[in-house]
């Protein structure tokens, strides 16, 4: 399959390709290995934060050459590492860049690179793989094509804190189906990843929480500690999501203290207007899922921190479209305004699914939400 950008974008990019971009690619073919290495380093510096330059280099064929150099046993470790770094930088561009890299078979090449004994090179390959796999346009099934890949990734977890970080992030984004969960479980995901919960790295902890949902009180208590207010908000929300999933799966009872006293209040806290828009959406949707089948949780939530009245604020964003002059900002705000309303409706539906008194409270706030907070509910 050709390693190209999509046709309309490719035509646009080609019209702006500069002589400098061509020079970077030409240097990759120099017969002097030292000049090739310096060329790759210069390319790395040139593409940092420059999506236009990244697109130019992809169109000019830099990716196949970088992959060739990365896979050559005759290439020095430094050169192979720098190639992986540049490829990772190219992957941080647009979704079209990711598609082009995947079409060039970057994933098999990087996975093969993980067999190298050089830890620095392994970390560079994993970092690039992480960047590719977290993109929504990357087919996650590519991680499971070769049955030897998952066990090898498990074996690399203990190599360094960076390998832990990158591998857990890869797993968290590539565990999408029951089949994926089974593959990871069968290759020791719980035994290998659960100990990482004591890792000093926040990124490792966050990824572990995303990728491992296990039964057991000990882990539930770890999640509870991670929901404390002095923890990063993203960590609190992720821990609350994990306990929500465990609860819905039957691993934790709905009347357990870690749900009633910790998880539910944490999720209500995420719905407050002080939180970021994305956090408010995720908090409301997770809370709706948590209490959907349980009337007692619905009753508790309805009287926790004025939640019903709090949701009225979800319908007041953005407050003034006419005051927003930046088009990108307007698009962002309108998108989140829709997501906020959708999340609020889901939470309203979950709250009022069983109890008439809660439904009355929801209707009361619904009828007055354009006027401000409903005093009856406060």
Image (tube, helix red, strand yellow):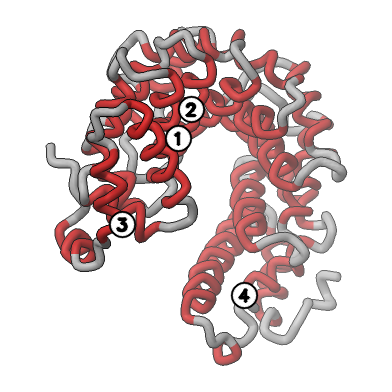
Residue lying furthest bottom: 322
Residue at x-position 80% and y-position 49%: 300
Regarding mark 1 in the picture, which secondary structure is present there? helix
Dot label at residue 315: 4
Cα distance in 3D space between marks 2 and 4:
45 Å
Report which residue position mark 1 lands on: 85
Q: Residues within 10 Å of mark 2 (few under 14, many from 20)?
A: many
Query: Judging from the image, what secondary structure is the residue with disc 4 in?
Result: helix
Residue where numbered disc 2 is placed: 124
Label 2 or label 3, whichever comes before in sequence order: 3
Mark 3 = which residue?
Answer: 20
Quarter holding residue 113: top left
* Whether residue 142 is visible: no
Residue that appears at 47% across and 47% down: 45
Residues under numbered marks 4 and 1 in contact, where contact means CB atoms less than 8 Å apart = no
Determine whether label 1 and label 2 are within 8 Å by CB.
Answer: yes
Q: Is residue 51 left or right of residue 321?
A: left
> Considering only order in the chain, which callout, 2 or 1, is on the residue closer to the N terminus?
1
Give the Cα separation between the discs numbered 3 and 4.
50 Å
**Residue situated in front as seen by the camera: 286 or 32:** 32
Number of residues whose C-alpha sits closer than 10 Å to that of mark 3, classed few (under 14), some (14–19) or many (20 or more): few
* Distance in Å between CA atoms under marks 1 and 2: 6 Å
Which tag is nearer the camera, tag 1 or tag 3?
3
| Residue 374 appears anywhere in the view | yes
Q: Please identify the quadrant where the C terminus is shown.
A: bottom right
């Amino acid at each position: 399959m050709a390693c190209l950008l999509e046709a309309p974008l490719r035509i646009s990019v080609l019209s702006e390709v500069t002589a400098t971009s061509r020079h970077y690619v030409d240097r990759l073919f120099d017969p002097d290995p030292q000049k090739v290495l310096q060329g790759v380093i210069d390319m790395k510096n040139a593409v940092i934060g420059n999506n236009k330059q990244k697109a130019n280099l992809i169109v000019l064929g830099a990716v196949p050459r970088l992959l060739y150099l990365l896979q050559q046993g005759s290439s020095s470790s430094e050169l192979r590492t720098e190639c992986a770094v540049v490829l990772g930088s190219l992957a941080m561009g647009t979704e079209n860049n990711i598609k082009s890299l995947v079409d060039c078979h970057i994933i098999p090449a990087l996975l093969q690179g993980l067999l190298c004994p050089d830890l620095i090179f392994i970390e560079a390959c994993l970092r690039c793989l992480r960047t590719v796999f977290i993109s929504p346009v990357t087919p996650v099934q590519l991680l499971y094509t070769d049955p030897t890949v998952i066990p090898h990734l498990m074996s690399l977890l203990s190599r360094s804190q960076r390998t832990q970080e990158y591998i857990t992030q890869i797993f968290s984004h590539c565990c999408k189906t029951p089949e994926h969960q089974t593959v990871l479980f069968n290759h020791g995901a719980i035994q290998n990843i659960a100990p990482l919960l004591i890792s000093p790295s926040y990124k490792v902890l966050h990824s572990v929480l995303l990728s491992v949902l296990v039964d057991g009180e000990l882990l539930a208590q770890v999640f509870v500690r991670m929901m404390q207010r002095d923890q990063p908000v993203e960590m609190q929300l992720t821990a609350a999501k994990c306990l929500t999933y465990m609860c819905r799966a039957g691993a934790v009872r709905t009347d357990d203290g870690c749900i009633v006293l910790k998880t539910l209040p944490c999720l209500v806290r995420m719905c407050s207007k002080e939180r970021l828009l994305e956090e408010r959406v995720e908090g409301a949707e997770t809370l709706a899922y948590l209490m959907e089948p349980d009337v007692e949780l619905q009753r508790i939530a309805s009287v926790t921190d004025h939640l019903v009245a709090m949701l009225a604020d979800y319908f007041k964003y953005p407050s003034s479209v006419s005051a927003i002059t930046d088009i990108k900002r307007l698009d962002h705000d309108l998108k989140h305004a829709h997501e906020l309303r959708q999340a609020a409706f889901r939470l309203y539906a979950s709250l009022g699914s069983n109890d008439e008194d809660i439904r009355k409270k929801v209707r009361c706030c619904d009828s007055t939400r354009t006027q401000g907070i409903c005093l009856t509910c406060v």
